[in-house]
Image (cartoon, grey):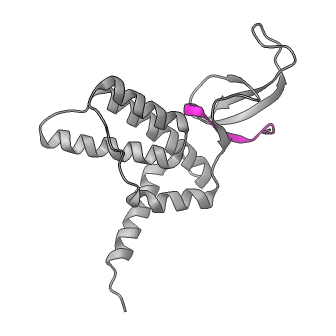
Amino acid sequence: MYQVGALVVYGSDGVCRVDNVGPLEMQGAQKGVDYYTLTPLYRGGTIFTPVDTPVSMRPVMTREEAERLVAQIPYIPEQVCQSNNPRLLNEQYRASLKSGDCLELVRLIRTVYAKDRRAAEKGRHLGQVDERSRKQAVDMLHGELAVALGIGVDEVEDHISRALERARQEENAPVG
């Protein structure tokens, strides 16, 4: 059970702060059931969910885990898209987003960026499903990395770019 003040990743809602744990005194809440009251860090609203929720909930990654993930980004392969059917594509992306797994989020983002490059080469644009899913994955990933790294969410992209550039320089450095 998470304690008040804990930072958790809740489903596809991203990073949330646990503001309360206990029974809810509101219409529709089950009597005798403890609920988490969660506040998303990067959007408005409040989430009320039973403590034994089936929705994926986990602690925010540590700084060390975040740094390891950033270092792995160039080596995380794209997803293999089984279809161009928007409904099936949406289901595939939804599963990645619902998992809340950072590797899956990076994979989804890399997949859509690659599709965007291929589409641009043909003078085309990405579909709404791709754009919307990429944005949600970026928001979720950057939100968690920001908290783990102790930086602003608007600084995450630059942090990743710098880390990737350092990795490229190290790979190209002369041995000796």
> Which of the 4 image quarters holds residue 166?
bottom left
Which is nearer the eye, 6 or 109? Answer: 109
Q: Where is residue 58 shown, x and y percent of the image?
A: 67, 42
**Is 176 drawn above or below residue 164 in the view shown?**
below
Confirm whether the magenta stretch covers residue 7: yes
- Name the residue furthest right: 32
Looking at the image, residue 171 sits to the left or right of residue 24; the answer is left
**Is 41 drawn above or below residue 153 in the view shown?**
above
- Image quadrant where one finds the N terminus: top right
Q: Which residue is found at the position 40% from the left and 69% from the top?
A: 167
- Name the residue furthest left: 122
> Which of the 4 image quarters holds residue 9?
top right
Looking at the image, residue 112 sits to the left or right of residue 123; the answer is right
**Is 26 drawn above or below residue 8 in the view shown?**
above
**The magenta segment:** 2-12
Q: Which residue is found at the position 53% from the left and 33% from the top?
A: 98
Q: Which residue is found at the position 59% from the left and 58% from the top?
A: 65
Which is nearer the eye, 23 or 84? Answer: 84
Q: Where is residue 135 shown, x and y percent of the image?
A: 41, 35
Q: Where is residue 169 shown, x and y percent of the image?
A: 35, 73
Which is nearer the eye, 84 or 40? Answer: 84
